[in-house]
Amino acid sequence: QKEVEQDPGPLSVPEGAIVSLNCTYSNSAFQYFMWYRQYSRKGPELLMYTYSSGNKEDGRFTAQVDKSSKYISLFIRDSQPSDSATYLCAMDPGSARQLTFGSGTQLTVLP
Amino acid sequence: NAGVMQNPRHLVRRRGQEARLRCSPMKGHSHVYWYRQLPEEGLKFMVYLQKENIIDESGMPKERFSAEFPKEGPSILRIQQVVRGDSAAYFCASSSTGVVTDTQYFGPGTRLTVL
């Protein structure tokens, strides 16, 4: 079993839709949770960062962490074609500087 | 302010040759991380380096792979005697400190193809 599981998709939504992306994990030591966006043939770009359980909002993006369920989510409101990319969740226990990534969800927002 | 730079962007090697991948961190960053991304898989941590020191190499294969980050110049990931299974995208990230809350900024990656 992988430490971090993420539905690879692909996921296609119409412009303006609310998108929900999710990851589950098995390692209870993870304390820091991140979402990265990766455009084709580019490096990952940090979108959101959350420590422990709770919600965090930044513009159209909301990250949620539920440590009791070992489940994290990223919501994108009013999705745009420019949001089309692969979204990677990543986690860090805090004791080491190595991120553990999910396999990524490929999102396409159709105009 | 240039971001993390990696070169070459694409590298083709035949089986048995050596591959050298270079990473120049963001200005002011002294912490470098290497990750490998296989097709249809997420990024896997390989090694974490500070200037002249390897901090954590727990994700590095025991043979053929080595990494360095000298006092001057870029970080180098070296793969000796490459095999087809080494074909992947190799990403480098950097941060200004080793504090866990400090963002890792990623480069564009080097895509290695082994023929």
Image (cartoon, rainbow, N blue to C red):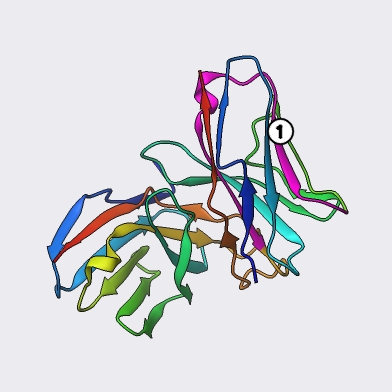
Residue A54 inside the magenta-drawn segment: no
> Taking the image as drawn, is residue B1 in sight?
yes
Q: Position of residue A81 (x, y in %)?
A: 22, 66
Judging depth in this view, the residue of A106 and B56 nearest the camera is: A106
Residue A63 as seen in the image, left or right of residue A51: left
User: Which of the 4 image quarters holds residue B16?
Assistant: top right
Residue with the mark numbered 1: B78
Residue at image position (87%, 53%) is B72
Residue at image position (66%, 60%) is B94
Q: Position of residue A94 (x, y in %)?
A: 61, 65
User: Which of the 4 image quarters holds residue B8?
Assistant: top right
The chain holding disc 1 is B
Judging depth in this view, the residue of A68 and A2 nearest the camera is: A2
Q: Position of residue A111 (x, y in %)?
A: 13, 66
Residue B106 as seen in the image, left or right of residue B29: left
Assign a secondary structure to mark 1.
strand
Residue A68 as seen in the image, left or right of residue B33: left
Q: How many marks?
A: 1
Asked if B81 appears above or below A20 in the picture, the reply is above
Judging depth in this view, the residue of B78 and B58 nearest the camera is: B78
Q: Position of residue A71 (x, y in %)?
A: 34, 64
Judging depth in this view, the residue of B47 and B6 nearest the camera is: B6
The type of residue carrying mark 1 is: Arg
Residue range corresponding to the magenta coloring: B72-94
> Taking the image as drawn, is residue A29 in sight?
no
Residue A36 as seen in the image, left or right of residue A20: right
Residue at image position (42%, 48%) is A41
Residue at image position (38%, 83%) is A58
Asked if B13 appears above or below A11 in the picture, the reply is above
Specify the quadrant that holds the N terminus of chain B: bottom right
Mark 1 is surrounded, within 10 Å at the Cα level, by few (under 14), some (14 to 19) or many (20 or more) other residues, namely some
Asked if A61 appears above or below B14 in the picture, the reply is below
